[in-house]
Structure formats: structure tokens, C-alpha cells
Image (cartoon, rainbow, N blue to C red):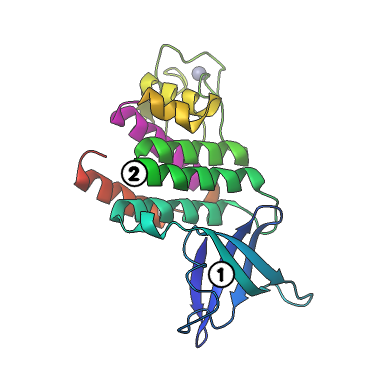
């Protein structure tokens, strides 16, 4: 998912093992020319990896890796590369170390492939963020007020950064922002079906952006900090106009 330079020519690598969860390890010599790791340790690369645990150390030793699918081509486009960085930052932040995370693994692969096919769309990222929040157990119902239980449809809901819940017009606090029923409908479609179906629905960009922003607020609430790549993505995205 991410790597950091370490020592003279090594890399500290945070990777997601689909069976054993998020693990950190050292790839010796990975930054040297002609390293045996080649470009296998790039962001979101899907690889086969051989590593060894050492009882006394927290970091594993990465011995070898083999590329299955690279996303270097996707990173050539600036906004796509920021979208991939957002996915990797979120995953790194929300997953505990060594907690099995096969659904999250599959979600990442599906999302990265969808960005390759469709570009860094709000819809694809909204799907990723909502499902990450759902898999983590941090997403409340999208059709009911979390305080009084009243059905939100056909009204809008209200929420605020720092809150994972949606409230109705009676229960809202003054400073909460409305979220449109179109955005909630995008959210419901995302959670009840596949990404393909959501993309076929082709939801308008406004509601998709609202849904993404709502899901990102929930994730930031959970990790108790702002996501660095969120700001970059939102700035870059608005500068480019239509995506
Ligand atoms: Zn209410």
C-alpha cells in the first residue's frame, strides 16, 4: 500500500495480506538500482510476496515479490494517482495491524481496476469509501434518523463532519448540513448492489460528490484526523471541472 525510504537503500513497506491483514516489513536493498524487487512494491501493486516473521521484531523481512497486476499505468494521470493515494491512505489508516481483511482487499482491487476503466470518478470513490465505512462497522442507516428512528424518505437528512450519524430535520443540530435525497439514494444503491450497477445508473456528479464527502467525513471521524490526500483530491478535482 505504501512504502517509506529506510536506511541506505532499503524500504519500509506497509502491505495488505489478504489472509493475515495489514503488515509492515523491510525490503532490503529495494531502493538500489537493479534491486530484485523491481517495481513490485509500487502503490497498490497486486503482488505475490514472500516474507518471514521474526519473533522478536514487529517488522517482517520481505524476501521476494512478484508482480501480478500493476497500477503504474493508472498513476500516469495525476487525478487518478491522487485517487489511488486516497485509497491507500484510507486503508492504511482504518485497518488494524494483522487483522484479516479479505473483503477490504477485494474492495481495493475492484476500486483500482474501476479507476483504470472509468477514471477517478466520484462514483467509484464514493463506493469505496461507503463500503470501507460499512466493513468497519461505522456506517449507520441511510434511511432513518439515528436519534428518533423516523424514516428520512422523502426528506433530506442532516449530518456534520465529526459525526457518523444522519439526523432528521427535527433532531438536527443547527450547524449540521443537509444531505440531499439524491445523494442518499446513490449511497443506498452503492450498498445494495455492485459497483458495475452503480456505474450503469450513472448518477449525476453533484449527489455523487455529496455521498463521497459524507463517507469521507465518517472515515475521518473514525480515524480522528484529516486525510491528507482528501484535500489534494478535492482541490484537483474541482480544478478540472467535469470528471
Ligand atoms: Zn429524528
**In the rendered image of this protein, does residue 232 appear above or below residue 38?**
above
Whether residue 103 appears in magenta in the rendering, the answer is no
Foreground residue, 161 or 86?
86
**SS category of the residue bearing label 2:** loop
User: Quick one: which residue is furthest to the right in this view?
Assistant: 55
Q: Residue at x 48, y 82 (%)?
A: 34
> CB of residue at label 2: within 8 Å of ligand 1?
no
Q: Is residue 204 magenta?
A: yes
Is residue 42 visible in this depiction of the protein? yes
Residue 163 visible, this angle: no
Q: Quadrant of residue 55?
A: bottom right
The stretch of residues the image draws in magenta is: 203-221
Q: Position of residue 167 (x, y in %)?
A: 48, 24
Q: Nearer the viewer, residue 202 or 133?
A: 202
Of badges 1 and 2, nearer the viewer stands 2
Q: Is residue 216 left or right of residue 77?
A: right
Q: Residue 158: which quarter of the image?
A: top left
Chief SS of the magenta region: helix
Q: CA distance from mark 1 to mark 2?
A: 27 Å
Which residue sits at x=45%, y=13%? 153
> Label 2: which residue?
119
217 or 21, nearer to the observer:
21
Please state, as top left, top right, bottom left or bottom right, where the C terminus lies in the image.
Answer: top left
Residue receiving disc 1:
13
Q: Along the horizontal axis of the image, is 149 left or right of 210?
A: right
Residue drawn at x 34%, y 51% as measured from the top left? 80
Amino acid at each position: 500500500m505504501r512504502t517509506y525510504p529506510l536506511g541506505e537503500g532499503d524500504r519500509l513497506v506497509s502491505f495488505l495480506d489478504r489472509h493475515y491483514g495489514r503488515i509492515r516489513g523491510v525490503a532490503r536493498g529495494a531502493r538500489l538500482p537493479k534491486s530484485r524487487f523491481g517495481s513490485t512494491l509500487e502503490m497498490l501493486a497486486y503482488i505475490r510476496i514472500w516474507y518471514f516473521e521474526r519473533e522478536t521484531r514487529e517488522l517482517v523481512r520481505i524476501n521476494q515479490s512478484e508482480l501480478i497486476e500493476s497500477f503504474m499505468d493508472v498513476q500516469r494521470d495525476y487525478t487518478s494517482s491522487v485517487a489511488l493515494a486516497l485509497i491507500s491512505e484510507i486503508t492504511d489508516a482504518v485497518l488494524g495491524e494483522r487483522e484479516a481483511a479479505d473483503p477490504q482487499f477485494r474492495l481495493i482491487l475492484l476500486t483500482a481496476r474501476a479507476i483504470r476503466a472509468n477514471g477517478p470518478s466520484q462514483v467509484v470513490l464514493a463506493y469505496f469509501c461507503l463500503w470501507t465505512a460499512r466493513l468497519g462497522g461505522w456506517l449507520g442507516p441511510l434511511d432513518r434518523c439515528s436519534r428518533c428512528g423516523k424514516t428520512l424518505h422523502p426528506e433530506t437528512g442532516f449530518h456534520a463532519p465529526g459525526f457518523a450519524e444522519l439526523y432528521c430535520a427535527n433532531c438536527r443540530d443547527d450547524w449540521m448540513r443537509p444531505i440531499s435525497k439524491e445523494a442518499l439514494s446513490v449511497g443506498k444503491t452503492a450498498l445494495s448492489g455492485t459497483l458495475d450497477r452503480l456505474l450503469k445508473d450513472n448518477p449525476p456528479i453533484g449527489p455523487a460528490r455529496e455521498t463521497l464527502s459524507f463517507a469521507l467525513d465518517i472515515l475521518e471521524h473514525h480515524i480522528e484526523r484529516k486525510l491528507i490526500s482528501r484535500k489534494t483530491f478535492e482541490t484537483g478535482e474541482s480544478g478540472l471541472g467535469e470528471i
